[in-house]
Image: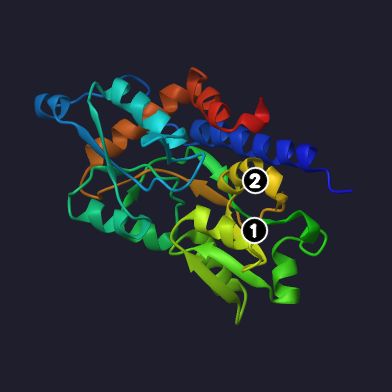
Amino acid sequence: MFDFSTRLLQTLIYCVLSAILLIGCTATMQDTGASLSGSAKTKALRVGVSANAPPLAYKTGGKLQGLEIDLATQLGTYLGRDIRFVEMRWDKQIAALEEGKIDIIMSGMTITPKRAYRVAFSNPYMRSGQILLVRMDQAGRFSSGIYSLMASKPAIGTIKNTTGDFFITKTIHGANITRFSKSEQAVKALIDNKIDVFVHDAPVVCHLAALNEQNKLTPILQMATDELLAWPVNKMNGELLDQLNGFLVTKSRDGGLESTIKRWVPYLQ
């Protein structure tokens, strides 16, 4: 029998604990408050977000919320700087960072070689991966995760220009892919039988499954990839990069990082 609650708990505990261990392993000597210049102290930190990835970053009643929004607020307190969120499309964020329109991206971005060529990543704060969201009556068909997609050639939904999109395109030759700009669009297509499976980040898929239990959607908790989430900054901004890593070390050691992750992953409560 498909034991949703037990496997979901195991997967998300793995993600949270791995995040804390990763910070400890990559800790620098900067475990105290960051040293800022006078101009930096008074200048708001411009945080680029794509608010379509609950529970990481999304909007409710016109208000931004989620794990990344919470961490950004804590970062502002740590740095003694105001936070100004700049909403933009996912595929526009790195270009905006390179052009100096934002200072940092906090949208659940995975470290990849191509992205690391263009931007500098902080130490990772969470381990994640791609999993499947399917209709409950199709759980048996997709029980082997990514291998099920290779065997049956279903209609697959992804979010354009995400690691899920890249992974499916690279891994499954001739895949039948529909690319969406928002996860809500993909969920609706899944409910309406326009796609058979939605491939996306584990925290997002689990959140969407919980929200759509009445629509009989369920995650397939077999990680297709092993990914590290981190915050990109402009490669020329080494000072901010050091400050981010100092923040992560401090929040990891005082337990704040773990408690914040758990707050936005309610399945662990």
Name which residue type carries label 1.
Ile
Q: Nearer the viewer, residue 61 or 38?
A: 61
Identify which residue is drawn at 75% across, 75% down. Answer: 151
Q: Are marks 2 and 1 in contact (CB under 8 Å)?
A: yes
Residue placed at 34% from the left, 33% from the top? 244
**With 71 as the anchor, is 4 left or right in this view?**
right
- Vertical comparison of 109 with 15: above or below: below
In the structure shown, which secondary structural element does the residue marked by tag 2 occupy? loop
- Residue 35 in the image: state x and y as whole percent: 22, 23
- Per the image, label 1 sits on a secondary structure element best described as helix
Q: Looking at the image, which is closer to me, 74 or 198?
A: 198
Report the residue at 48% width, 40% height from top: 56
Residue 174 percent across, percent down from the top left: 60, 82
Q: Position of residue 117 (x, y in %)?
A: 34, 60
- Furthest residue toward top: 254
- Mark 2: few/some/many CA within 10 Å (<14, 14-19, 20+): some
Say whether disc 2 or disc 1 marks the residue closer to the N-terminus.
1
> For the point 72% across and 36% down, which residue is it?
9
Residue 58 or 222: which is nearer the viewer? Answer: 58
In this view, which residue lies farthest toward the bottom? 174
Image vertical order of residue 84 relative to residue 144, above or below: above
> How many numbered discs, if any?
2
Residue type at the position of mark 2: Asn
Q: Return the residue at label 2.
A: 212
| In-front residue for pair 230/135 | 135
Name above or below for residue 18 compared with residue 87: above
- Say which residue label 1 marks: 191
Kindly identify which numbered label has been placed on residue 74: none
Residue 220 visible in image: no
